[in-house]
Amino acid sequence: MQRRLLGPIIVGLCCLLLHFGTTAAAAQPDAEEKRRLLVQGLTVYELDREIVRLTEEEKRLNEKLAETASQVEQAAKQVELRQRKTEKVIRSYYSGERNSILLAALHVRSIQDALYVWDQLQFILESDRKSIDDYLQRYQSYKTMKAKLEADRRQLADTRISFTAEKEKRLQAQREVERLLASNSDRIKLEKELEQLRMQWEERGLPLFQRYFTALSAAMVKLPEMLGQNGKMLSIKGLSPKVTIGDDELNRFLQQKNKELEGFSFLFEKGVISAGGNVDSASISLKGRYVVENKPTNAVRFVIDSLSFNGYPMPTSTAKTLERQFDLAFYPNKVAPFVHATDVAIENGSMTIFLKIAL
């Protein structure tokens, strides 16, 4: 009898323990889910910042557009006025209105009369030339303003598209945050952790990025010094020289030029540049690459592909904001005005910039 009762009791206890274990597991988020929540929370925060920036940018562009449109309207009126005057001048030559001056020059009876006619002829010709030149200058100015107006309109349209896209990303990220919070019983604790991480990013992470990027931007201006000090970096073969920079050499140079960079370093790997730094409990890192650009000027520009703070990836908008704020480019024409970059190759431990000499 006891043996027959023992089996169901054991089964019941196992079911009860299994139930409690499942309930406890459901109440506690796993590490991956918690990490996803914190990442999405940071994403929402950064997208909010980007939306504010785009809102301000749209306002600025609207004001700029209105001002440019007014200038174009005024320029169009001036061009029309000058055009009528220019047409009148040109027509006078074809219709013979200026012939009287030339005939007068043929019938002068004294040197005094000849000098007078000559002065009048010079005055009229100079006045006519100025009228034509003034029209051409104003017309060119009008064309420039009109092109600027069209560029402003395109920029405003792009900003509005970006604004809509960022709002949609923000909405999706917020939904994910709400979903992850709703699936856990310890919501209040998770919300506190999320807020703490946001504060750490705002008070320590973002300022640390800005501090390093400010120092890097200032140090990169002095990069031609390093090339001048180390002739081995430059290899000249015909009209296609190249510069090879080691990551150790670059780190030493940058840290010598700015003490703020002593905790920050670059690492060159195949096709990728990694960089990062640590200050107290704040750790930042990024991955990117150098690319050659020819507009508005020839430059080897740094493109940020990813950012992270304390191991948490940041959204693309954060990387693009830092790119806009800080210039980390290398300008070959500052080494020599006739030198242009054509390509960049990144290998383990070194980066090679291929140049050409434009004669």
Image (cartoon, helix red, strand yellow):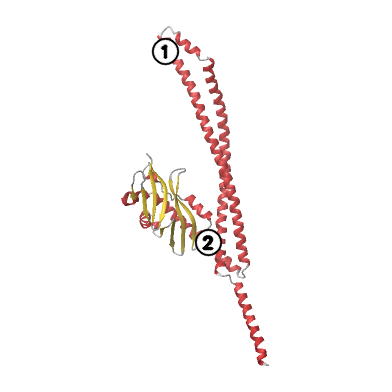
User: What residue type is disc 1 on?
Assistant: Leu
Q: Residue lying furthest top in this view?
A: 109
Residue under the image location 56 percent in, 24 percent down:
84
Q: Which mark is residue 115?
A: 1
- Determine whether 61 is above or below 1 in the image: above
Question: Label 2 crowding class (10 Å Cα cut-off): few <14, some 14-19, many 20+?
Answer: few
Q: Residue furthest bottom?
A: 1
Q: Quadrant of residue 152?
A: top right
User: Where is residue 220 drawn, in percent x and y?
Assistant: 40, 51
Q: Which residue is mark 2?
A: 199
Identify the residue at horizontal 55%, vertical 22% (top origin). 87
- For the residues labelled 1 and 2, the Cα–Cα distance comes to 85 Å
Rendered view: 19 above or below 321 = below
Res. 194 image quadrant: bottom right
Q: Nearer the viewer, residue 65 or 248?
A: 248
In the rendered image, residue 7, in percent from the top left (x then y), is placed at 65, 87
Instruction: Out of 269 and 145, give the one closest to the viewer.
Output: 269
Pointers 1 and 2 in contact (CB under 8 A)? no
- Quarter of the rendering occupied by the N terminus: bottom right
Residue that appears at 55% across and 28% down: 79
Q: Position of residue 246 (x, y in %)?
A: 37, 55
Q: Nearer the viewer, mark 1 or mark 2?
A: 1
